[in-house]
Image (spheres, grey):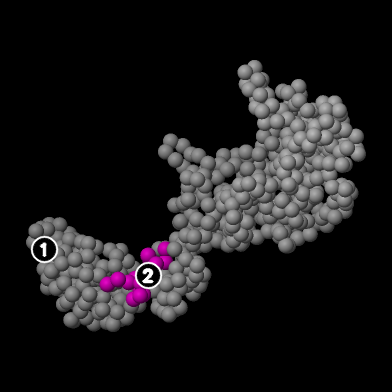
Amino acid sequence: MPDRAVIDALFPADLPEPAYWEQRYPQRQLPDGAQVTRVGPSPTGWLHIGALYVGAINRDIAHRTGGKYLLRIEDTDQAREVEGAVEQFDRAFGYFGVTPDEKEGQGDYGPYFQSQREQQYLTYARELLREGKAYLCFATEEELADIRRRQEASKIPPGYYGGWAIWRDRDDADVQAKLAEGAPYVVRFRSPGQVDGRAVFTDAIRGRLEHEDNRNDVVILKSSANEVRLPTYHFAHAVDDHLMRVNLVIRAEEWISSVPTHLQLFAALGFEQPTYAHIAPLMKQITGGKRKLSKRKDPEASVDFYIDEGYPADAVLFYLKGLANGRIAEMPLAEALAAPINLDEMGLAGPLIDMAKLDDISANHIATLSGAQIVAAVKQWAASRDAELVTVLDAHHELALAALAVEREGVENPRKDLRKWSDFRTAYGFFFPELFTPVTADDSRIEGVTPELARAFAADFADGYQHLDDGQEWFGQIRELAAKHGYAKNAKEYKKDPDAYPGSIREASQIIRVALTGSTRSPDLHAVATTLGEAEVLRRIRAVAG
């Protein structure tokens, strides 16, 4: 092992000792049992809905126990970083109210970007080298590839360990010679693990787990040829979680196999190890089974999908909390949002993302909101997505409220035709003249009626139209005209002798429905007409009359 002077010469002369960092990041003054949690997204892509799911769980547990929830950007893989990803994280967590207590520019345990914590990593890497718990490795890509080939040929477990770790026990003279010639190196952890060794640990969700121990001398500092000496994820997470005083790490189950490595690093560094809780991934139902929700294949895997579609934040959070703990899914929304998430109630099978279920939850939630709340939310959503809609809602605020009152206010079962804010144009756009294209008699939505008959019916309706307050009397105008134009008075009569009639009262009323709403399905026609006003009703009917 190189002596201390040789090791220290590899690092900046003013690099602090571990004691400096321990003092700089003291133990947090929190109540007994307080949990300090974190989410650590990588800016190599957009935020997955699973990250929001994990964030919601982290935030809930931290706040319920009097702890802290922090956002750490794990940006050590800078070659794959996506521009704008960090801003998207802030936007996504902010939209859903899963805002961290600490993040860059907010908190005493930063920087909260791993790329800005180089000195901390170098301090602890130097300490491991000084203690002989890490070593310099000059193995080339060709040598590493040769090791893999020989291991595969001999059917030996792959990796850089034991006798295969060609720089683990090299003479100091060999190390000095490589340093003298300026050869690039990485710093490797000297694993205490053995082939066929087992590691036992307790998971906060899964209980006692036993896994193959880590035998590999994993890289903890990347190549010295790099301008910035960045750590690998394994090493960075150990140093950061310790110095940020994180004591509960909630993460995806794919990291279970890394726990033995992480426990070795914590022990070697003399750090108190955090509690780990590994959650099952969010899944998607497919033909013949299910698979992990994929950002590459599934639009609903991206948090931006829910924001762009305009799902209310509370509805999505309610849904995600229900996936975490089934009992929460059975509660009323307001109660569910306040209910605690318990790790020991989380299942081991990946919960399914069911968009139909989310749509139902969202529609039920929106049905409880006032018209004013809906208009405000739609305008906020549309501000960056549908400028015309914002202009129309500003110009016709009272009309918007009246439209939203139709079959929603003063009724036992309010309409649930809004699942998300992007539905507003489809469900309510026809109320606004600027958003409605008048229908002509040859429109395909006027089904089973010739254009000539549609024109004649609409002309008669407009000529004799009375804008009546009573719904039955108002509809009586359609009924009288239907009889005049030879329509059957009901569907039963029409079915008895379909050749004798152009249709039933249903087909007759559809002419007026399509004329007023542009759709074959709509709220109560009288309520629609009352909301539109007499002049607009006549304008639309006369468009069909030609």
Q: Is residue 284 left or right of residue 269?
A: left
> Quick one: quadrant of the C terminus?
bottom left
User: Quick check: 11 above or below 487?
Assistant: above
User: Quick check: 313 above or below 228?
Assistant: below
> Quick one: quadrant of the N terminus?
top right
What residue lies at 46% left-to-right and 62% top-to-bottom?
420
**Is 285 part of what is drawn in magenta?**
no
Is residue 405 visible in the rendered structure shown here? no
What residue lies at 45% left-to-right and 78% top-to-bottom?
394
Q: Is residue 121 left or right of residue 19?
A: left
x and y percentages locating residue 76 in the rendered image:
68, 47
Discs 1/2, front: 2
**Is 437 part of what is drawn in magenta?**
yes
Q: Secondary structure at mark 2?
A: helix
Q: Residue furthest top?
A: 154
Q: Disc 2 designates what residue?
A: 429
x and y percentages locating residue 105 in the rendered image:
72, 62
- Which tag, 1 or 2, sits closer to the chain's start? 2
Magenta region, residue range: 423-438
